[in-house]
Amino acid sequence: MKSRVYFIAVNNVDTAVDIKIKLTQLLLDSRILGFVNKGSSVCIKMHFGEEGNTGFVKAEYVRLIVDYLLSKGAQPFLSDTNTLYKGRRTSSAEHLRLAAEHGFKRELIGAKVIIPDEKIKADIQEIEIGGRFIKTAKIARVFLDADVLIGIAHFKGHIMTGFGGALKNIGMGCASREGKLAQHSDLAPYVAMEKCTGCGECVKVCPVSAISLKKNKSHIDNAICIGCATCIAVCPFSAIDVHWDKGGELIQERMVEYAKSVLKDKKDSCAFINFAIKITKECDCLAKDDPRISPDIGILASQDPVSLDKACLDLVNKACGKDIFKEVHPQRNGFKQLEYAERLGLGSLDYELIQIRLSD
Ligand code: SF4
Ligand code: SF4
């Protein structure tokens, strides 16, 4: 059966005011959040944007969604997990500060912002999923505990998955740091020798003693490393990293298995909204202003994350007259994530696009 995807068009010349009017119309006409009940705790899964990034979904748009939920008597809050890479979203305290700088703070957004801390055991939940690639998923508990999960994503390109939208926001974005590295597991961490000062901080935190100092430089034994990514987070000189451009083929399947584990108990209590606006080559983790690679498309919403991402992909490619994500990331086939997600029962590639227009 076809899933419904609601769509309101946005043009490159639309102002923030225009976009807010259109988003309001989309929420009202689609009734996409109509299932949310009074008193329900609603987790809005966000990406608050790396410092210097300009593509992330703006706080003023999210505020409208928060207000809609508050008007229904629900209890919304915003959340995201810390990153695998080293940046301002690596630790919960700094992540919160950056989110606030981007307008995501209670006084402005009308809802609390929660960044789980993977150092606190209770913040992370392990779920046995027995997937083909992931046996035990490690998810930030906040996304599982909420009555309702709403994924708000910026639809754009991605260095490792070709493109990213609703599935990536949930699959990668709800995983703990350890879970993120498990999804990237073809990528063992490496030490950039020129940056390593031999301070030994990574040696102290490695849970399996995979790191030793040799000639005053850190050395990681990949045969012992369990991929927890703690060393990446603690190195004060950003000397430990992974080769982001060398991701293996399986990252999309792992990411989809993670998405399935997050959504396992949320069948009728989740919804997804993609902003296909300022569509960039790279994701919002990029700490700079990435230019557009496509005309703006619009805002799309569905309860089916597979249909939603597929509709975004189709509209972007139609507007560009070619498979633009394949062109900018020729080594990636982003369609894999959609096919695998459909196979795992996360949604359908077959959808009905319902266009919403502004009322006179
Ligand atoms: S924490 Fe970083 S700088 Fe210090 S020893 Fe480890 S890799 Fe080198
Ligand atoms: S990723 Fe974890 S297990 Fe591997 S070297 Fe770093 S701290 Fe140790």
Image: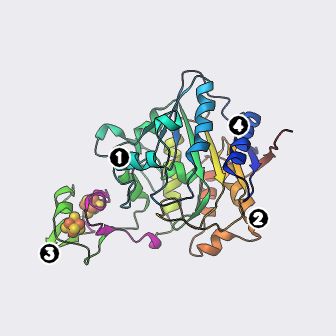
Looking at the rendered structure, the kind of residue marked 2 is Ala
- Crowding at label 4, few (<14), some or many (≥20) Cα neighbours within 10 Å? some
Q: Residue furthest left?
A: 215
To which residue does mark 2 refer? Answer: 319
> Mark 4 to mark 2: distance in Å?
24 Å
> Mark 1 to mark 4: distance in Å?
31 Å
- Crowding at label 2, few (<14), some or many (≥20) Cα neighbours within 10 Å? some
Asked whether, in this view, residue 206 is left or right of residue 267, the answer is left
Element at badge 2?
helix
Query: Which of 129 and 39 lies nearest the eye of the viewer?
Result: 39
To which residue does mark 4 refer? Answer: 27
Verify CB contact (< 8 Å) between mark 3 and mark 1: no
Asked whether, in this view, residue 108 is left or right of residue 27, the answer is left
Q: Residue at x 44, y 53 (%)?
A: 134
Asked whether, in this view, residue 312 is left or right of residue 55, the answer is right
Verify CB contact (< 8 Å) between mark 3 and mark 2: no
Q: Is residue 234 magenta?
A: yes
Disc with the residue nearer the chain's start (3 vs 2): 3
Q: Quadrant of the N terminus?
A: top right
